[in-house]
Amino acid sequence: MEIRRAMPVIVTDDPTAAREFYERFLGFRVAMDQDGMLMLASTSTPTTQLIVAWNSPTAVDPEVTSVDVSVEVANVDAAYAQAKAAGLEIVRDIRDESWGIRRFFVRDPTGRVINVASHIASS
């Protein structure tokens, strides 16, 4: 499986303090700022990223707070087929999201929920 990036998901009740910590102390830059979620990227290694998420009734992706790690793969359909064939617990079935990704959630052996996703190719 070709992994393009993996991002921990940090759920918080104080997104302002979390943003300040990761931007000012660690030097991350905000790569995406949406209601309920910030994606932060390293300025020196842009694929080093993390997600800060919080509950919001109008969040673009309200399910992000139920995820522990987000992994972008080259082919999410192949990853899904592999997970099913291995008998892994699929927490949320595969589907396309309105913001341009296709994803599913799987539980790892430690109980963590992993979001496995690919960007949908534009036609």
Image (cartoon, rainbow, N blue to C red):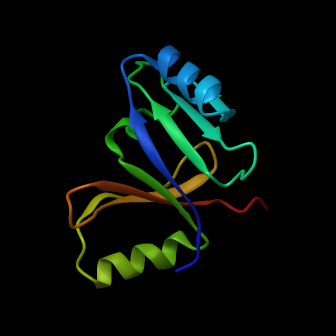
Does 84 sit above or below residue 67? below
- The residue shown at (23%, 79%) is 87
Q: Quadrant of residue 92?
A: bottom left
Residue 77 seen in the figure: yes
Q: Residue at x 38, y 23 (%)?
A: 55
Q: Quadrant of the C terminus?
A: bottom right
Provide residue 94's location: percent of width, then percent of height: 42, 61
Of residues 6 and 114, the one nearer the viewer is 6
Q: Position of residue 109 (x, y in %)?
A: 21, 67
Seen from this angle, which residue lies furthest front? 25
> Residue drawn 41% across and 37% down?
10
Q: Toward which corner of the image does residue 62 lie, by quadrant?
A: top left
Q: How many marks?
A: 0
Q: Residue furthest bottom?
A: 85
Q: Would you place residue 89 above or below residue 44 in this image?
A: below
Front position in the image: 102 or 114: 114
Residue 46 spot, x, y in % from top left: 72, 50
Residue 82 at x, y = what percent? 39, 81
**Vertical comparison of 10 with 7: above or below:** above
Q: Is residue 11 left or right of residue 89?
A: right
Horizontal side of 45 relative to 61 (left or right) equals right
Residue 94 in view, yes or no: no
Outermost residue to the right? 123
| Residue pictured at 41% horizontal, 52% vertical | 69
